[in-house]
Image (cartoon, rainbow, N blue to C red):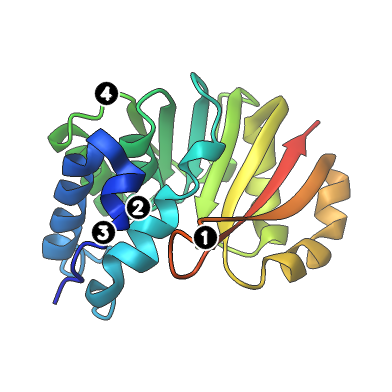
Amino acid sequence: MLENEPAVAADLFGDRIDQARAFTAALAEHGEERGLIGPLELPRLWSRHVLNSVVAAPLFPAGGRVGDIGSGAGLPGLVLAIARPDVRWVLIEPMERRVIWLTEQAEALGLENVEVVRARGEDWKQGPVLDAVTARAVSALRTLIPLTAPLVRDGGELILLKGANAANEITAAEKQIRKFRLSDVRVEPVGEGVIDEPTRVIRATVR
């Protein structure tokens, strides 16, 4: 059964809450059958996935163009696109069935700030043009850096949603951090005192 909407959801989404509700309902209805979420996720879909994503929304640059690598079900990409209509989101996803889902949802929700690209991060052909790149539950930081940093312009940022092991991931990625000239690499918890389990975000500047 789908988790009841937490009271804080309306605060976090503001006047965009109806779109967030529509997306969450669609994911609850079709997510498992379309291979987007596992069968155990419905009782925690809001708290573990949707709110976990939206608390990072204030971190992204207004007016920027931001990539979401491995966008999957739209977590965090579609959630962030709902919460931040002032940002242009490029959802980068290699699997056709997920690309179809992302495209359907962007259209159904009226998200004119979303572009869906069928590709892997390493296949990106446009060069370092994005203001920031995000990802959630894709891979360890040391694997993620070579997939994300080359897409970001000089002075842009990696804003990666991670779990409790984020600090250890930074330690394990020291070689890649040097190779790709990342600076100010840090873990920043967001949502403390707002959601039950804060989201840990690894932030780094690309030079």
On the image, the x and y values in percent for residue 102 come to 27, 44
| Residue on which disc 4 sits | 112
Mark found first going from the N terminus, 3 or 4: 3
Mark found first going from the N terminus, 3 or 1: 3
Which one is in front in this view, the residue at disc 3 or the one at disc 1? 3
Left/right placement of residue 60 relative to residue 188 reads left
On the image, the x and y values in percent for residue 86 come to 40, 23
Depth check: 13 or 119 in front? Answer: 13
SS state under label 2: loop
Label number found at residue 7: 3
Q: Amino acid at mark 1?
A: Val
Mark found first going from the N terminus, 2 or 1: 2
Marks 2/1: CA distance? 13 Å
Task: Tell me the residue at 64%/64% (across/down).
Answer: 140
Q: Is residue 189 visible?
A: yes
| Residue on which disc 1 sits | 138
On the image, the x and y values in percent for residue 101 come to 22, 48
Q: Amino acid at mark 2?
A: Met
Q: Residues within 10 Å of mark 2 (few under 14, many from 20)?
A: some
| Residue on which disc 2 sits | 95
